[in-house]
Amino acid sequence: MTKFKCHFCAMCNGQACKSELPGMGGVRENENFMLNVCGWKNVRKEYREKIESYLSQSVEFRIPKISVAPMTGAVENMGYGEESEYYEEIANASSNVGIGLCLGDGFPDEKLKFGIRAIERIREREKNAMRASVFIKPYSNERIIERIGWASKIADLVGIDIDSYNILTMRNLVNLEKKDAARLSEIRDFVHGKLGVPFSIKGIFTDDDIELVKKVRPDVAYISNHGGRIDTRTGSTAEYLAKNAAELRKWCGEVWVDGGIRTPLDVATAHALGADRVLIGRPFVTALCQDGERGVCGKVLEMSMIRFGADSYRDE
């Protein structure tokens, strides 16, 4: 039986897995991991009226757009016996449940290839056109373009995961670059010209990142601090979204966010504060580890918000 690294806490708040890396924890004693989780409740207190107004809408106007966040390292971080097993399971679950899927890459290159192949198998078996949003770490542009080529038939969006530059182990393994606007614009133009799909910058979390978005003008600005797993400024993605969504939207087509989202009310809060899409990582992974595809289906239904209205605050 697989021994997964998650502690399967009743509330995934970062207390049990402090600094468990490899594993499901984060850096600095899970500081930003824990801030991400409590951040959504904190911003609800400050923006209560805005969120209540959003929740007062009819269901059809607040059906959430949810995707599985890009997560890799199934063996070292999650406890899977084989890397390919995770990608097959999460791709099948995403396809059958009907939510978006993001693929990330890592070291070695097979991690991205496993994800691509899992989607190709579904397409062949189900005779459908399943695709995924593909996020690539900030290698040299030459290597990025090579990886885009691998994913060209299954990608519905390509993004550069700029915040993963701050993962020291990855940077030492594969020579990651700190991307400037010119290099990101080169990739944007390639993605638009060769694939004809949207381009995203993932890892927006600082003032400097906003300046990058202004210069590059990506289709999607993706707010993330890597689930608290990287060294960056102290804070939560919730407060960053609340503060900066309106400014970011001036320079991009959509704003996405991940980090600490645990409840339907968190999903609603993210949408009410300006997120076009909400990406969920650990909760879907732990549901998958506990109960396979059925667990993911249950978690998606839980997060759907269909049963939630403006009175949802009564529990807070």
Image (tube, rainbow, N blue to C red):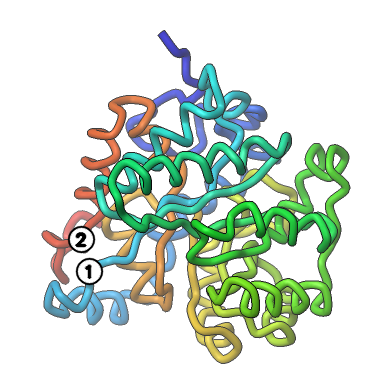
Task: Name the residue beneath numbered marker 2.
Answer: 305
Say above or below: 4 vs 157. Answer: above
Query: Does the rendering let one see residue 112?
Result: yes
Placement of the N terminus among the 4 image quadrants: top left
Residue at 16%, 71% in the rendered image? 310
In the rendered view, does 162 fall on the left or right side of 168? left
Q: Pinpoint residue 299: horizontal percent, then vertical percent.
A: 26, 43
Q: Decide which of tag 1 and tag 2 comes sooner along the chain.
A: 1
In the rendered view, does 240 fall on the left or right side of 131? right
In the rendered view, does 134 fall on the left or right side of 295? right
Task: Name the residue beneath numbered marker 1.
Answer: 63
Quarter of the figure with residue 316 = bottom left
Residue at 64%, 46% in the rendered image? 105
Say above or below: 23 vs 252. Answer: above
Name the residue type under label 1: Ile
Q: Are marks 1 and 2 in contact (CB under 8 Å)?
A: yes
Disc 1 to disc 2, how far (Cα)? 7 Å
Query: Does the rendering let one see residue 283?
Result: no
Residue at 28%, 34% in the rendered image? 293
Q: Nearer the viewer, mark 1 or mark 2?
A: 1
